[in-house]
Image (spheres, rainbow, N blue to C red):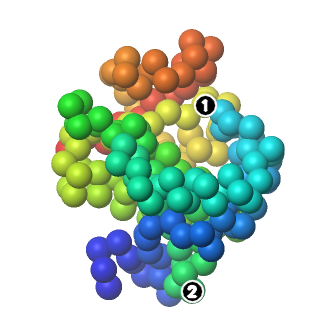
């Protein structure tokens, strides 16, 4: 089993590069309000071409790392990312989304743990941080239950990517090397 793969209760979970075949299942979560309700973008207006373009972008981007979380049949379950990788600050912003059918199945915990490991051990980052709306109780419970520490020490480089109104609603988390 590769380092980007685990077996959990008989299920194999893997991280791999995003592929064009993932686009229809990406669009599925984008059009599911129960998944995207607290996210900052208007995913309801996205089309299959937007997903395909994102996959193409992810394959060549150097400032972001976007990977698919897949099951043992190579079916796309979600996307996990390190965004705005800042080599000077040795930091990146984490992001994740999974399809509704993957929630509560271990895919989020696996994908998150693995992308953070890649950031810290393979890319050489010192910190991976992320924010979540206080209103997104499901996500806040998930991060707290999994022991991720909250932080108020967020560089302006990352806070400045959001409006003052958004920042007022955010809880920030961090994992440090």
Q: Element at badge 1?
A: strand
Placement of the N terminus among the 4 image quadrants: bottom left
Q: Nearer the viewer, residue 77 or 64?
A: 64
State the image coordinates of residue 129 (x, y, percent, origin top left). 38, 37
The residue at 20%/55% (across/down) is: 121
Position of 124 compared to 144: left or right? Answer: left
Which circle marks residue 133 in the picture?
A: 1
Q: Residues within 10 Å of mark 1 (few under 14, many from 20)?
A: some
Q: Is residue 87 above or below residue 7?
A: above
The residue at 23%/44% (across/down) is: 125
State the image coordinates of residue 106 (x, y, percent, origin top left). 53, 67
Any part of residue 41 in sight: yes
Circle count: 2
Q: Nearer the viewer, residue 1 or 20?
A: 20
State the image coordinates of residue 65 (x, y, percent, origin top left). 40, 52
The residue at 77%/53% (across/down) is: 47
Quadrant position of residue 28 = bottom right
Front disc: 1 or 2 = 2
Which circle marks residue 155 in the picture?
A: none
Position of 146 compared to 55: left or right? Answer: left
Label 2 belongs to which residue?
Answer: 73
């Amino acid at each position: 089993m590769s380092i980007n793969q685990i077996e959990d209760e008989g299920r194999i979970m893997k991280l791999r590069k995003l592929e064009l075949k993932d686009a229809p299942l990406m669009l599925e979560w984008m059009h599911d309000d129960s998944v995207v309700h607290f996210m900052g973008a208007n995913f309801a207006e996205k089309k299959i071409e937007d997903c395909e373009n994102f996959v193409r972008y992810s394959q060549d981007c150097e400032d972001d790392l976007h990977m698919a979380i897949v099951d043992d049949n190579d079916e796309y379950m979600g996307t996990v990312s390190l965004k705005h990788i800042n080599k000077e600050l040795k930091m990146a912003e984490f992001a994740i989304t999974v399809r509704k059918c993957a929630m509560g199945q271990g895919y989020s915990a696996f994908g998150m743990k693995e992308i953070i490991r890649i950031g810290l051990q393979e890319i050489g980052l010192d910190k991976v941080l992320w924010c979540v709306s206080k209103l997104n109780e499901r996500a806040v419970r998930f991060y707290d239950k999994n022991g991720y520490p909250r932080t108020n020490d967020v560089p302006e480089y990352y806070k400045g990517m959001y409006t003052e109104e958004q920042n007022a609603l955010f809880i920030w988390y961090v994992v440090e090397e």
